[in-house]
């Protein structure tokens, strides 16, 4: 991951509502949730949720797949792990350098 991609990912998570959507999808696991299921669990209005899902999908944090007339949304676990790893790989590199 490059710095620009990481910054975009963290910016997408910078909204309380979008973070709530991602956490809801993470809790749901790899099977994902339909938009209606996310709406029920978060209490968000449909138009607001659609906006946030589009933003999260563009940032690569949510994967969307058409399933008949529904759209199943899944957390992009690999991408989320990449963001966490990007930050944590710098852990303690300067410790003891003083």
Image (cartoon, grey):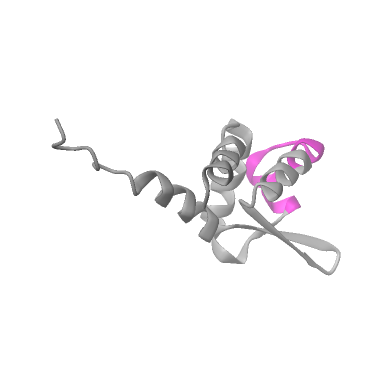
Task: Please provide percent x and percent y for residue 67.
Answer: 79, 68
Instruction: Write down the region rendered in magenta.
Output: 35-49
Q: Residue at x 52, y 54 (%)?
A: 27
Residue 35 in the figure: left or right of residue 18: right
* Quarter where residue 45 is shown: top right
Q: Residue at x 78, y 43 (%)?
A: 50
Residue 47 in the figure: left or right of residue 56: right
* Quarter where residue 54 is shown: top right
Give whichever of 97, 74 is nearer the camera. Answer: 97
* Quarter where residue 39 is shown: top right
Q: Residue at x 64, y 41 (%)?
A: 42
Does 61 appear above or below 78?
above
Q: Main secondary structure of the magenta part?
A: helix
Task: Please provide percent x and percent y for residue 63.
Answer: 67, 58
Task: Please provide percent x and percent y for residue 77.
Answer: 53, 59
Give whichever of 70, 65 is nearer the camera. Answer: 65
């Amino acid at each position: 991951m490059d710095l620009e991609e990481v910054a975009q990912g963290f910016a997408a998570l910078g909204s309380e509502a979008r973070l709530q959507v991602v956490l809801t999808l993470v809790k749901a696991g790899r099977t994902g949730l339909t938009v209606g299921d996310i709406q029920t669990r978060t209490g968000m209005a449909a138009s607001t949720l659609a906006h946030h899902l589009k933003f999260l999908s563009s940032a690569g944090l949510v994967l969307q797949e058409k399933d008949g007339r529904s759209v199943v949304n899944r957390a992009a676990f690999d991408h989320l792990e990449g963001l966490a790893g990007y930050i944590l790989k710098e852990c303690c590199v300067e410790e003891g350098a003083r």
